[in-house]
Image: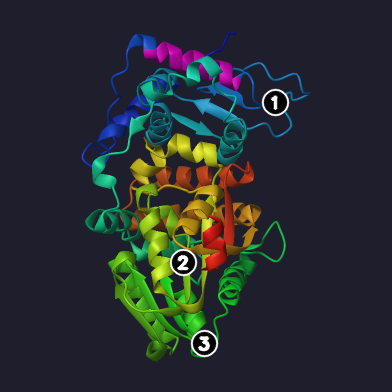
């Protein structure tokens, strides 16, 4: 295979890298050490992988096409392009750190794409066959173990949540809809229009409240306040709500929004870990919070849900899921997402939720998936974030952060579009004695 390379592109990429703040982004500002052998293996694996999928590779400003699969794809019908501005740095990073290096290379500006979601969707759809089976046995050579500091102990969980959710309320307000809801919406139709976003978020919230049978005087516990929209809607139904969070930024804004909505008398917001909550509740709702718990603490999480339920109570969860085998493969792996976006997080599988909830004495009585709606949610967030790039910069977030955030949103959207990820709403109740005996 012959590929033309623009000599100016690596120079420009190297200059961009030297402008990276080494204190904020030490592993982006410098190239990692990678042996010649590891870099060569990474280059060969990537060349073989890209040759098998509908992605066009371009080096610098000169296109160099990787041979396409024999499926009629010719690179002209919307085939996404991945442009390598600095191929040597790109392969060195991947050789040293695998997918973490892949992400850091994007943050450094060493590669781009005319369709970032398209490229990532193709890679996600072919994740099981991109690497030859013989080389998968060497996965441990490229995978890093999760750092001990990211464990979700009582102290660690607070630090992990604050590293993401306390970035800036103003940042989140730039790309979320006016309800400030940071989880998957449920749209009336797909594809969705931005004008329908808040209604779609309310539809999602109302479905969860209906699932938990929340009504007048319901004693409701919400684990994971966000910016308070679910608590507000529950209070307008007449429920009495305790909502807990570990984010001070979210707590402060949620209190103001709850007061502005005129429901302060029905909503209490506390900075509290789910393991420290006391009381019994008719309903417990938790929206996309289990992903921040960590597999080590899933037993404690579901035990807390069961302990906090009053007789006849209902739990309603919204959870992102991934296939069980893939979850097991990544459970102890330090990924780009866990390093830069969600420290300590792990997306569960449906099987793991079923197993852990059953072990805690809970039965799943309803389970609805709607992953395509999360892809649309993420598309709207990403497009708005990119449109507000100057405003993000004005808040003090530099070019590396903006590229990191763009990659995070695109990476997540691609996971749902490729059906690598799903999102589900589940209803759980206390297991009957007969059910527990059967286990």
Identify which residue, 257 or 334, lies in the foreground.
334
Asked whether residue 285 is drawn in magenta, I would say no
Residue designated by label 1: 75
Q: Quadrant of the N terminus?
A: top right
Q: Which residues are magenta?
A: 38-50
Query: Where in the figure is residue 117, as x and y percent of width and height?
Result: 58, 41
Residue designated by label 3: 236
Side of 344 where 424 appears, left or right: right
Please determine whether, in this image, residue 297 is positioned above or below residue 407: below
Looking at the image, which residue sits at the far right?
A: 72
Q: Are marks 1 and 3 in contact (CB under 8 Å)?
A: no
Which of labels 1 and 2 is toward the front?
Answer: 2
Side of 292 where 314 appears, left or right: right
Q: Are marks 3 and 2 in contact (CB under 8 Å)?
A: no
Residue designated by label 2: 286
Distance between the alpha carbons at the discs numbered 1 and 3: 53 Å
């Amino acid at each position: 295979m012959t590929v033309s390379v623009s000599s100016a592109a690596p120079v420009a990429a190297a200059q961009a890298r030297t402008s990276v703040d080494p204190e904020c982004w030490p592993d982006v500002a410098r190239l990692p050490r990678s042996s010649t052998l590891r870099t060569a293996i990474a280059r060969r694996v990537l060349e073989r992988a890209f040759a098998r999928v509908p992605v066009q590779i371009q080096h610098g400003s000169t296109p160099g096409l990787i041979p396409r699969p024999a499926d009629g794809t010719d690179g002209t019908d919307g085939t996404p392009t991945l442009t390598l501005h600095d191929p040597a740095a790109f392969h060195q990073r991947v050789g040293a750190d695998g997918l973490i290096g892949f992400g850091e290379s994007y943050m450094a500006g060493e590669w781009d794409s005319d369709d970032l979601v398209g490229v990532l969707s193709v890679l996600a759809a072919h994740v099981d066959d991109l690497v030859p089976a013989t080389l998968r046995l060497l996965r441990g050579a490229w995978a890093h173990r999760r750092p001990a500091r990211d464990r979700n102990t009582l102290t660690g969980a607070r630090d992990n949540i604050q590293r993401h959710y306390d970035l800036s309320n103003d940042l989140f307000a730039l790309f979320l809809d006016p309800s400030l809801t940071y989880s998957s919406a449920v749209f009336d139709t797909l594809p969705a229009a931005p004008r329908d976003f808040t209604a779609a978020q309310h539809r999602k919230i109302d479905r969860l409240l209906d699932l938990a049978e929340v009504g007048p005087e319901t004693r409701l516990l919400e684990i994971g306040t966000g910016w308070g929209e679910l608590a507000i809607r529950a209070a307008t139904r007449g429920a009495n709500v305790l909502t807990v969070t570990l984010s001070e930024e979210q707590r402060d804004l949620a209190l103001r929004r709850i007061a502005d909505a005129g429901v302060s008398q029905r909503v209490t917001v506390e900075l509290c870990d789910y393991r420290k909550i006391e009381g019994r509740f008719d309903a417990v709702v938790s929206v996309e919070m289990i992903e921040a718990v960590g597999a080590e603490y899933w037993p404690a999480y579901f035990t807390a849900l069961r302990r906090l339920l009053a007789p006849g109570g209902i739990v309603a969860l919204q959870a992102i899921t991934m296939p069980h085998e893939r979850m097991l493969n990544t459970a102890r792996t330090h990924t780009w997402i866990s390093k830069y976006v969600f420290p300590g997080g792990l997306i569960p599988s449906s099987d793991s939720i079923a197993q852990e909830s059953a072990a805690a004495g809970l039965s799943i009585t309803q389970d609805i998936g709607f992953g395509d709606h999360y892809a649309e949610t993420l598309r709207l967030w990403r497009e708005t974030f990119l449109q507000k790039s100057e405003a993000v910069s004005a808040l003090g977030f530099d070019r590396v952060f903006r590229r990191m955030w763009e990659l995070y949103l695109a990476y997540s959207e691609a996971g749902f579009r490729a059906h690598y990820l799903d999102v589900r709403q589940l209803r759980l109740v206390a297991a009957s004695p007969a059910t527990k005996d059967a286990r």
